[in-house]
Amino acid sequence: MTRLRKEIGFVAHLLRLSLASNMEYRASFLSQIIGMFINNGIYFVFWLLFFDRFQEIRGYQIDEIFMLFAVITLAYGIAFTFAGNAMDLADLIAQGRLDYYLALPRPVLPHLLFSRMGQSTIGDLTFGVIAYLFTGRLDPGSILLFVVAVLLAAVIFVAFTATAGCLAFFMGNATMLSTQLSNALLTFSLYPFGLFQGVVRLVLLTLIPAAFVGAVPVQVVQGHDLGALALLALGALVGVIVMAVVFRIGLRRYESGSALNVNI
């Protein structure tokens, strides 16, 4: 427990340093946040126009869309605001830039993931909070389930993205592939799950766990479904285990880079 508290304190210190670094250029920092917030708003307007014409699509109405966007944008914002390096992991591996983290007496993977804070993703985080207010589910039980479901979805976002980045250990430059996989997770999660059937539905529950960051959390909050919450927690646990195992195996294949990099 003492070791765990020290590591949590270390991660908190990394986040404070990242925030201070981002705030050094406040205009750029704020413009990226506002830009991402507007981007989410434009995408959401599409669904508002759609449901203004069609009342339902495969069991989803406008209330479910509000909840879906609230869950996904907040989970995505939390995931990559705090674990910003997850999205750049493939680049860091391909360029041989893990040496800095390997040289320090800290667990490599948590240090690597949390050593950079995302900027634009704070716009996602803000949008998610505001979207949830429009759901009208402001009773304590729903809020608690929403927070827990969002945190578990954020863990899945980070675990899947980092695992995709670890492909660089085995393929060399896997930046494009890891980006496509991460974008696939986000894109498919933003659509009503009822649209997908057969093999595609199975893939979205396993290889690309889009259902676990979208449809399942919505079911947890709207139905107060504890069974779905347990399934979501299991999915997050499996994601973290797979990420840790793939990273450990890949690290044995890692080759140091020749470039000099300064980490502040």
Image (cartoon, grey):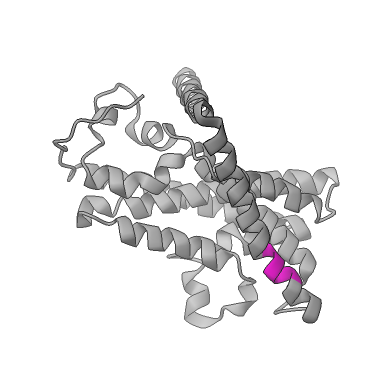
Relative placement, left or right, of 29 versus 74 is left
Q: Main secondary structure of the magenta part?
A: helix
Q: Position of residue 186 (x, y in %)?
A: 52, 61
User: Is 141 left, or right, of 214 in this rendering?
Assistant: right
Quadrant holding the C terminus: top left
- Judging depth in this view, the residue of 18 and 67 nearest the camera is 18
Left or right of 41: which side holds 86?
A: left
Residue 27, position as x, y percentages in the image: 56, 35
Q: Is residue 50 left or right of residue 43?
A: right
Camera-nearest residue between 106 and 32: 32
Q: Where is residue 254 drawn, in percent x and y?
A: 19, 43
Q: Nearer the viewer, residue 115 or 138?
A: 115
Give the magenta range.
Answer: 44-48
Asked whether residue 227 appears in the rendered view, the answer is: no
Reply above or below: 146 against 82.
below
Residue 117 in view: yes
Q: Which residue is painted at 54% across and 28% down in the image?
A: 23
Rendered view: 146 above or below 215 = above
Taking the spot 63% from the left edge, 48% from the top edge, the residue there is 74
Question: Residue at coordinates 45% horizontally, 22% vertically from top-left?
Answer: 10
Residue 231 place in picture, x, y as percent: 59, 57
